[in-house]
Amino acid sequence: MARGINTKCLHLEEEEGCCNNYGSISFPIYQTATYEHPAVGQSTGFDYSRLQNPTREHLEKIVATLENGIDALAFSTGMAAITLAMELFKPGDHLIVDADLYGGSIRLFDNVSTKNGLQFSRIDCWKEDVESYVNENTKAIYIETPTNPMMNVTDIAALAEIAKRHNLLLIVDNTFLSPYFQNPLDLGADIVVHSGTKFLGGHNDTLAGFLVTNREDISGKLRFLIKTTGSGLAPFDSWLILRGIKTLGIRMERAQKNAFQIAEWLKKQKAVTRVIYPGLPEHPGHEIMKKQARGFGSMLTFQLESKEFALSILEKVRMIKFAESLGGVETLITYPTTQTHADVPKEIRERNGITEATLRLSVGIEDAQDLLDEFEKVFAETEEELHGRKKS
Ligand SMILES: *Cc1c(COP(=O)(O)O)cnc(C)c1O
């Protein structure tokens, strides 16, 4: 019988019952660059840590089971993973990519992949006719759902059908929901991307990235590329991510619970013109998410009445940290305009709806009341400073 995801975060079924590693409950950190060979032509299975390392391999197997893939590869960062995925393509290949993506992915496509001869159509995959952008050079569709930071939701299964019809790879960056809430491979995707820095690691203390696939041919190509280019995750970082994953389920559930409370609170604020959280029934992607995911996550974006109001919040928060990144136990508030999406050209930002009054929140696992208390205080002080009005 297939195990539940919380169990899969802790235990690797295939390695059970064979007291390896002296019975160590915590998987050891194999801090080694190279491995002794028993004899000429023989190997322990490990030859050199750029190719593979036992700690990294254990992590990769766990992540593969979480995404229901046949193989997962662990990278030094999420961007290293995405960069490697782009090596699957050759000059002249065309990719359809979602318009609203993590800023670093847009920067990569615009400045590095384009230089390498790849061509991109940037469209709103959640609402446009994706098929009409397919041409004879199109090789892949690349999306996030929900997107960063506008939380647009794309129907993965519907897109997978288009991809299959035209023999395209469907690549889904699943960072925002983690495998705990969504498994794109089950819905027809070919490759899942994760920034392991975020929910998988979960503690804002290390960087990592993953590519997961359920196709033998893709796994083979990626394995060749990772050993050749050398962006695999280091042993100690692999161990930190393994440790983070152990509590993935309870962190995701609790952060989501907090996010719902904060979304409801934000909705009631005069200074907030829009709350974008897919867990709210009025979110345009709410029904699709109910169909394709097991939860809504803990990322939300909100628009303030003015840039001044947004900046004041960023200056006043104390426990809530004004910082980039997301998916950790600590609540972080981000200003996409100057942080995550600073290198995205202004017209694209504006087209996507990111303004100077947009804030993104990664809700952590603090007591919800303490988060609300801080927001109450920060909003009240800002109201008074900007409008001279006391908040009722
Ligand atoms: C952070 C992030 C990345 C990049 O990952 P790094 O680990 O920072 O390199 C990619 N995609 C999404 C959705 C992200 O949030």
Image: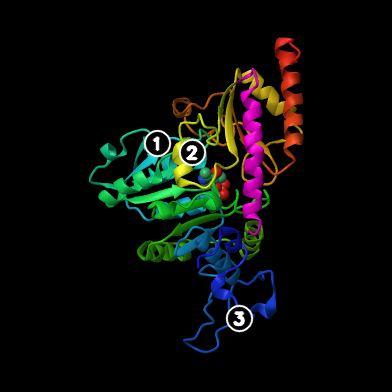
Q: Position of residue 281 (x, y in %)?
A: 52, 32
Up/down of 3 relative to 369, above or below: below
Q: Which residue is denoted by mark 1 in the rendering?
A: 126
Mark 1 and mark 2 lie on one chain; the one further toward the N terminus is 1
Closer-to-camera residue (185/231): 185
Which residue of the protein is positioned furthest toward the left in this rendering? Answer: 136
Q: Position of residue 391 (x, y in %)?
A: 74, 16
Give the residue displayed 62% in from the left and 45% down from the top. 327
Closer-to-camera residue (41/371): 371
Q: Which residue is denoted by mark 3 in the rendering?
A: 18
Circles 1 and 2, Cβ within 8 Å, touching? The answer is yes
Closer-to-camera residue (323/283): 283
Q: Residues within 10 Å of mark 2 (few under 14, many from 20)?
A: many
Give the residue displayed 48% in from the left and 26% down from the top. 353
Up/down of 37 relative to 32, above or below: below
Colouring rule applied to residues: rainbow
